[in-house]
Amino acid sequence: MPAVPFTAEDTARLQDTLEQVIADGATPGGVLAHGTVGDAPRFLSAGLVAAECGDAEPDQHTLYDIASLTKVVATWLLVGRALQEGLLDLDAPIRDALPAVHGDTPSAEATVRQLLAHTSGLRASTRLDHYRNAELPLHELLCREPLDDAPGGHRYINRGYILLGLALPHLYGRRLDELTAEVWQTLGMDATAYGPLARSRRVAPTERRFSGGPRIWGAAHDDNAGLLGGVAGHAGVFSTTADLTTYARSLLAAHARGDDSALGRWLHASLVAQAQIEPGLDRGLSWILADGGRVAYHHGFTGTSLYLSPETGRYLVICTNAVYHGNARTRIAPLRSLALKTISAT
C-alpha cells in the first residue's frame, strides 16, 4: 500500500490543538512532527522551552527528557539486537541473561517476552531507594521480590525494563549508554543520549521536586533512573523531535522491507498482540497497539509520544515537557487523543 500523506487539515488541527493545550497551561511549549517515509517531515511548534530558558522557542533540535519512550527507543531496540545475535531468548527466564542469582528468586522466572509485554506479574511499585546500602547487587534484590500477580495479565511495570537494562550490559560486557549510543549512531540519531546533560536553552527543564526548589534540568526526571545514574532500561534518555523522526522513519522503512532486515523482522514480531490492555488496545512487545493492530505507539510521562502506522507509512512525534506543570498524562490528553485519531485515519 502506498504511503498516505497527512492533509493540510490534519496539520492545522494538530497545530491548533498544540497551541490550545499550551494556552490551557498543559505545557510551556512543544514540538510535533509528522510525515511519511517518502516525504520530508513537517515540524510544528509553539510556546517556549520554559521560563528558565528565557525567550527560547522550542524547535526540532530542542532536547527533551523522553521518559518511558526510553523503553522503545533504547531497550526494545537493544533486545531485538540481542535476540538476533543469539544472546537472548524471548521465552527464556530473565535469570539466564543476568549475573548469577541465588536462593528464592521468583521474579527471575519472568521471561523476556513477559517483561517486554508487561505480563510478568512482577511487583508494580518500584522504589530503588529502598535498596540503598544493601549487600546484594540490584538485579538479585529485584529478582528476590515476590510477584504481585500470576503471569499473563497486562499491568504496566517499570521494573521489568529495569531488569532488561541490567541484563543487556551483562550480556555485552559494556555499559547500557555505550550500547545505545552505538545503535543510535548507525540510525543517524546524533543528538539522542542518556543524561545528564549540561543545562542550556536547548534542553527543556521538567519538574520541581519541592515547592520553591530548582527544576530538574538536564537530568532524568524519574527517581529510579536517577538512582541508577540516569542510565536505565525504563527511562533516562533525552532526544529531539528531529531524532525521533529519524527513528520513526527508520522503523517504517525496515517494516516495509520485512524479513530483508533484522529490524524489520523485530518490528513485525513486536506488533503481534501479547495481551489486552483494554477493549480496542493491546500490548505488543513494548508497543501499544491500536486500530486493530494497524497503529503502534508509546508515551513518556514527561509529555512525549511516538506513533507509527506501518500500513500507511505514517508517523507522528510529540515532544513536550508537560510535566513542568503537573501530570502530563492528563493535561496533554487532548493532543495525544488527536494524534492517535489522526495517525489512524486513512
Image (cartoon, rainbow, N blue to C red):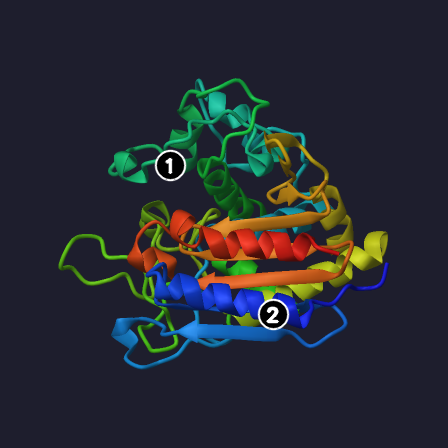
- Looking at the rendered structure, the kind of residue marked 1 is Pro
Q: Is residue 296 left or right of residue 67?
A: right
- Sooner in the amino-acid sequence: mark 2 or mark 1: 2
Disc 2 on helix, strand or loop?
helix
Within 10 Å of disc 1 (Cα), the crowding (few <14, some 14-19, many 20+) is few
- Looking at the rendered structure, the kind of residue marked 2 is Thr
Distance between mark 2 and mark 1 Cα atoms? 50 Å
Q: Which residue is mark 2?
A: 11
User: What residue sits 62% from the left and 46% below the top?
Assistant: 79
Which sits in the foreground, 223 or 32? 32
User: What residue sits 24% from the left and 37% below the top?
Assistant: 133
Q: Which residue is mark 1?
A: 137
Q: Is residue 327 left or right of residue 276?
A: left
Within 10 Å of disc 2 (Cα), the crowding (few <14, some 14-19, many 20+) is some
Foreground mark, 2 or 1, reads 2
Residue 290 position within the rendered picture, expressed as x and y whole percent measured from the top left: 65, 43
